[in-house]
Amino acid sequence: MGAANAAPASAVCARFPQVHLLLETIKGPGPARNMGAREARSPVIVFLDSDSVADPDWLAVVHRTVTARPDCGIFCGDVRILPIDPEAMNAVECYEELFAYRCELMIEKFNFAPTANLAVRKDLFEAIGPFISGLLISEDVELGSARPCPGP
């Protein structure tokens, strides 16, 4: 769904009384993720990029995976490209389909998990510390390097 077709976040969140929409005024994913992590009341914090579309059972899969692996604190889920037209992918979509967000490979080869689809136990997040603010660096490097496990 393109941004022009998406309902405003406030309208979507209003349908779920247990959801609280927060607004971070400092630009960048780090400050927004830090605010969400501070406000989280669950023992597990889940990050999903703003341009991602989760499967309907995504949170149930995250819950099952985290529950089954008490030995692991960070879980990286699969990230797939959602092309505008699956029958005629553009060059950027083709490139990202082949090379971007290969989470299992990133974990195996680089011991790193991107926060595009990530679950982390809150106590571990607090021990590692907040994301670095700003847009000049990859703010998820320190957290993503804390021995991730393949997951949801």
Image (cartoon, grey):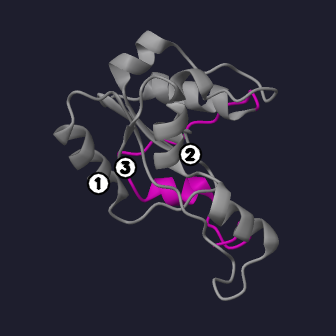
Q: Which amino acid does the dot numbered 1 rest on?
A: Val
Residue 18 is one of the magenta-drawn residues:
yes
Mark 1 neighbour class, 10 Å CA radius: few under 14, some 14 to 19, many 20 or more:
some
Q: Which mark is residue 61?
A: 1
Q: Which residue is mark 2?
A: 116
Read off the magenta span: 1-27
Q: Which amino acid does the dot numbered 3 rest on?
A: Pro
Q: Looking at this view, name the residue that lies furthest to the bottom.
A: 87
Q: Looking at the rendering, which quadrant does residue 28 occupy?
A: top right
Q: Which residue is mark 3?
A: 17
Whole-percent x and y of residue 77? 43, 49
Horizontal relation, residue 10 to residue 58: left or right: right
Point out the tag, 3 or 2, that comes first from the N-terminus. 3
Residue 133 is one of the magenta-drawn residues:
no
Judged by its main secondary structure, the magenta piece is loop
Whole-percent x and y of residue 131? 60, 21
Q: Residue at x 49, y 31 (%)?
A: 111
Distance from disc 1 to disc 3, alpha carbons, whole Å, reads 22 Å
Horizontal relation, residue 92 to residue 52: left or right: right
Whole-percent x and y of residue 25? 73, 30
Element under label 3?
A: loop
Horizontal relation, residue 129 to residue 148: left or right: right
Kindly tell me whether residue 35 is visible in this rendering.
no
Element under label 2?
A: loop
Distance from disc 1 to disc 2, alpha carbons, whole Å, reads 16 Å
Q: Nearer the viewer, residue 145 or 25?
A: 145
Q: Are marks 3 and 2 in contact (CB under 8 Å)?
A: no
Horizontal relation, residue 63 to residue 131: left or right: left
